[in-house]
Amino acid sequence: MNLIEKIIANHSKYDFVKPGDIVDIEIDARAARDFGGPNVVKTIIDKKLSIENPSKTFFTFDTNPTGSDQKYAVNQQFVRVWARNNGIKVYDIDHGIGTHTMINEGIVVPGSTAVTTDSHANILGAIGAFGQGMGDQDIAAAFNRGKVWFKVPESIKLIFDGFPPKNVSSKDIVLNLLNKFGANSLLGYSVELYGELIDQMSLSDRITIASMGTEMGVIILLFPPNDEIMAYSERASGGTLEKIAADPDAKYSQVIEIDATKFVRMVALPGAPHDTVAIPEQAKIKIDSAFVGSCTNGRIEDLREVARVINGRKLAPGVVLKIVPSTDDVWRQAMEEGLFSIFKTAGALISNAGCAGCAAGQVGQNGVGEITISTGNRNFPGKQGKGSVYLASPASVAASAIAGYITDENHIPEKPLEFHPEEKLERMQKAHQEQKIIEKPKIVEGRAWFIDEDNIDTDMIFHNRYLAITEISEMGQYTLDNLKGHEDFAKKAKIGDIVFVSKNFGSGSSRQQAVDCFVALGIQAIVAESFGAIYERNAINAAFPILTYRSVDGLSLNNGDQIRINFETGKIENRTKNTHIQANPFYEVQMEIYQQGGLF
């Protein structure tokens, strides 16, 4: 077996697993954050669930460690009280990013398993562990059962030949990989990395690359642990560990060789982490701000790189540099090493540890018309604010902050580029206009359809006899024509309708047409008690609004009722009956994909 298969088999009742198997996996670490954590607790309370093992269960408050947002503050306190009453540890706002805490504290070690409400939980692949971000209900189930079900993925093996040129960092390496594979070439695969370059990588470098696996569409980027990683994890956990490795005859869907000598310093253009280009030397893209931090580049090695580049220099006029360490330990170490003094002398702002720019309301957000260069892992519209975000390495971000435009450390000018207020005002006004045009509604209203049936599968939604149709505009006419009693749905449906269904809607095959047919009809949203797992992913990735509810009884719902849905809060109102219920709001990632019009 390969790495992912071994880890899954070791945590299941099976000695051997293969791609496509769906198995229950014992989870060594079950976590929730201040984002998602309150919903996990509410589900546990509402369903009257017990906690399987409090010692393996915990919370991390990392998305808003400043407590600056009233809603976050209320949710954090709600979770604190519940956790205290149930003997569950909280890594509170003074601690830092939860996935880093799992590694640093030995909660997760090579070969172990973890789930959390963080979509970048696959960062744990840096030490050869299985980590997955999951939704609130999955995490609540993990708290209760100690297990989750998971489908064993296909695996790809990447073999790196040679070494990149000097000063091409681990962030540049992963941006080069995104340039090669894009956002979907490796979609759904577990990817293992090999080669002398990989063997010699530090923990920090591995974390930087593993943390952007989500942006590549992979299940996880798995680094086989070397002796240095094993020693680190043994110190952190206080125990002796067995190194996990793929078998010599392990099977892979593909084995791909990569020439690392051709890697260059890169920057990801706004809106898409995979839209990467070599850092331009002539095109001087002016910036307003720079950000260093996130789970990708907030470790002490990253902060040292920034200090090395800016030491003895000043930020370009009008440029703001925000620096956020990943954990409190990194914060303290940076202070002890004198890095903070270098940062403050240059004119930077330093914040307490946490997720920072990736979390709305925390240090690192930007405004409409603002151009930011960031070490983060995502630059989807709205992710790090209302402005434009470029992604680059810590050294390139520092160099750009000194230069006043996007560059690398080999091309910092003697005098920084200064911006003209008139140009900046014009850019902001234009951005404001574009913002008004592109933002999609978070509240919709429409006529209700109530189809009170469980297990409506994709063949009932869009029968396989129509699968040869490739034009979405032609799919609507066949929607639900294989569902008894609703064969005429497509003829009666109107643009703007909202469909309510029951449990397990969209089970069955993986066909995207079962989502696209509703898009073709102009249906605004589907609300269900639960969705088939693949259908849910297909709908979210297509930016088609779906929500889940616990019970629809409170709506007194009938066909034709006028419905209003708030995607952000989850409130569903029946304006005809003057009733309402609380459904699950959009997940953070779901809202991002919805606002940008789809996964790509």
Image (tube, grey):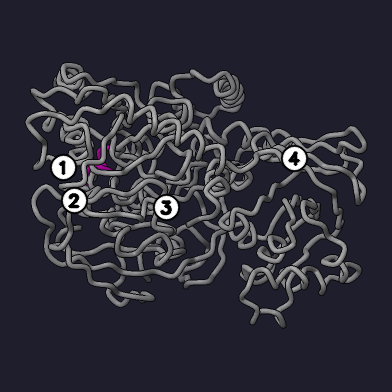
Quarter of the image for the N terminus: give it.
bottom left
Q: Is residue 146 among what the camera can see?
A: no
Q: On residue 528, which mark appears?
A: none
Q: Quadrant of residue 43?
A: top right
Q: Is residue 123 visible?
A: yes
Disc 1 residue crowd, few under 14, some 14–19, many 20+, Cα 10 Å: many
Q: Secondary structure at mark 1?
A: loop
Does the magenta stretch mainly form a helix, a strand or a loop? helix
Q: Please tell me which of labels 2 and 4 falls first in the chain.
A: 2
Which dot, 3 or 1, sits closer to the camera? 1
Label located before the other in sequence (1 or 2):
2
For marks 1 and 2, give the CA distance. Answer: 8 Å
Residue 265 is labelled as 2
- Mark 4 is surrounded, within 10 Å at the Cα level, by few (under 14), some (14 to 19) or many (20 or more) other residues, namely many
Instruction: Please determine whether, in this image, residue 416 is positioned above or below residue 15.
Output: above
Q: Is residue 272 left or right of residue 400?
A: right
* Residues in magenta, as a range: 230-237
Q: Which residue is mark 3?
A: 214
Q: Quadrant of residue 598?
A: bottom right
Front disc: 3 or 4: 4
Q: In this rendered view, identify the residue nearer to me: 365 or 41.
A: 365
1 and 2 marks in contact (CB < 8 Å)? yes
State the mark number for residue 565: 4
Q: Nearer the viewer, residue 406 or 305?
A: 406
Q: CA distance from mark 3 to mark 1?
A: 26 Å
Q: Secondary structure at mark 4?
A: strand
Name the residue type under label 3: Thr
